Image: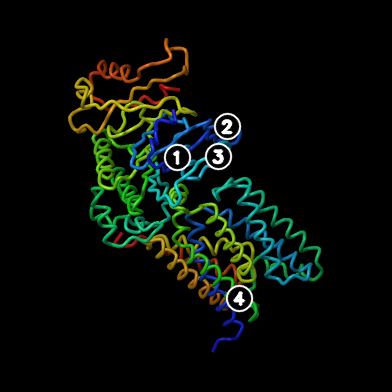
Amino acid sequence: MPDDFLVRAALAGLGLTLATGPLGAFVVWRRMAFFGDATAHAAILGVALALATDLPFYLGTLAVVLAMGLGVSALTGRGRAADTVLGVLAHSALAFGLIAVSFLPGVRTDLSAYLFGDVLAVTLTDVVWVWAGALAVLALLLWRWQALLTATVDEALAQASGIDPRREGLLLTLALALVVAVAVKIVGALLIAALLIIPAAAARGPARSPEAMAALAVLAGAFSVLGGLWLSLRLDTPAGPSIVAAAAAIFALSLIPRRSG
Amino acid sequence: MPGLCGGGQMTLIAARGLTVRHGGQTVLAGVDFAIAKGEIVTVVGPNGSGKSTLLKALIGLEKAAEGQVTRAPGLRIGYVPQRLHLDPRLPMTVRRFLSLPARASDADAAAALTRVGVPGLEARAMSALSGGQFQRVLLARALLARPEILILDEPTQGLDQPGVAAFYRLIEEVRGETGVAVLMVSHDLHVVMSATDRVVCLNGHVCCEGTPRVVSAAPEYRALFGLGTGGALALYRHVHDHDHDHQHDGPAHDHALDHGHAHAHGGDHAHSHHHEGTDA
């Protein structure tokens, strides 16, 4: 029988992958990787805000990340990126976040937990938050799936069918902010984007349809979480980076050419 | 001459005094445009003349800086984009694509593919289609919405002349069967679909409007266009009411004639009929 903390860690990680799988697919299709980075790095600033005020941790983080996401999408237009603007924003958000956190007594020592995550320390409340956030994102994506996919394929084509591509883009920004907020404690602000992109990239090879790719990305994410936790236990490595390392290994495996072509 | 169309018929989409700006640059200035039920309108213009911008403004993707665009309430639009930049990491079969954004039944999807002349392509990946097949699949998807108007952005780009003629015939057949209005954009200033009711020449503003001359009625041109086109192509004679440059003597000039001479001297047949930029 595994320890309780391990069960909570696995539950939190698996819950998160329900959202990061399909959302990560959109991040890959729409080339929002850098955009994901920028919003994720803002999470540190959100953590500082939440800890400095009496705001609940997840709400404070969500507020800042969402503000960052909306700001960035307003600045860069249609999610297709002005690289430089995103780079400036991503790294400044991280830097200001780190400075803000350094003013808070007692947090300095916990900093690595927010940068790299500390999934082995998640509480039952954290697990509930992660599942609530992930299920909300999953529900949002399923509800808007056809419209999101059409807007991703071609904006004009979506518009002609009565779908507002800007609205769908904003919904993705909202979903991204939610995922980032609940993922900070699990993989940390620095590696959230990795958990979005790597499983989705690994799922591309075998997938024949967008839906299959999203589902396979969930599967690849789940294996990454379990493999990373196992690695972390066996080698006493930090859990967040171990999860990402496991995802990278799965991606590498997906590159091996299949015999059928 | 915005008053040309309509004629008591129901207007599907209309623009009045439409001006669109990209940053500080004016892309379209004071464009009046309307298309009525069942009408076929071809918008021609050189590259950068604002043709695609006009289409995007008409469907509501581009905002009007001045003027306004009105669409009939609940108008069903079948849109065929110029190119589709499908990200290579987005796996998409033809069948799945036909179900965007509204889920199509297998029977409807098969019928649509058959109608556009590419039956049985369902399982094929979009990335594995030839240019002509891709164009027809885009059309099939647009038709599945049972549109009242088809909007096509340079649908024949990259097709050879028989391919263009075949595509135009297909559009004409679909119009005949369904009564759908067709709004098409083309960078080819002179050769348009012969079933076109009205040609609008655009260059940031509406330069001229008129009806095309049917090629089959002019044997000397017919020879230039080869035998395989079956009367699907027609020439458009530009009659501008103003000057664009000072090389022309009068306010009216005839591209069609210049065009004919160019080919006559070339001696070859008519695949070199792209006069991009001659009107700028």
Report which residue position mark 4 lands on.
A236
From the viewer's side, name the closer residue of A175 and B7: B7
Give a yes or no on whether discs 2 and 4 share a subunit: no
Q: Quadrant of the N terminus of chain A?
A: bottom right
Give a yes or no on whether discs 4 and 3 share a subunit: no
Using the image, tell me which numbered label, if any, was put on residue B55.
1
Dot 4: element? loop
Is B98 positioned to the left or the right of A69 in the image? left
- Structural distance between the alpha carbons of marks 3 and 2: 13 Å
Is disc 3 surrounded by few (<14), some (14 to 19) or many (20+) residues within 10 Å? Answer: some
Q: Residue furthest front?
A: B8
Q: Position of residue A10 (x, y in %)?
A: 55, 78
Is B270 positioned to the left or the right of A96 in the image? left
- The chain carrying label 2 is B
Residue drawn at x 57%, y 63% is A175
Q: Earlier in the sequence, mark 1 or mark 3?
A: 1
Q: Earlier in the sequence, mark 3 or mark 2?
A: 2
From the viewer's side, name the closer residue of B165 and B55: B55
Report which residue position mark 3 lands on.
B64
Whether residue A29 is situated above or below residue B2 in the rendered picture: below
Q: Position of residue B273 (x, y in %)?
A: 31, 25
From the viewer's side, name the closer residue of B210 and B109: B210
- The chain carrying label 1 is B
Give a yes or no on whether discs 1 and 2 share a subunit: yes
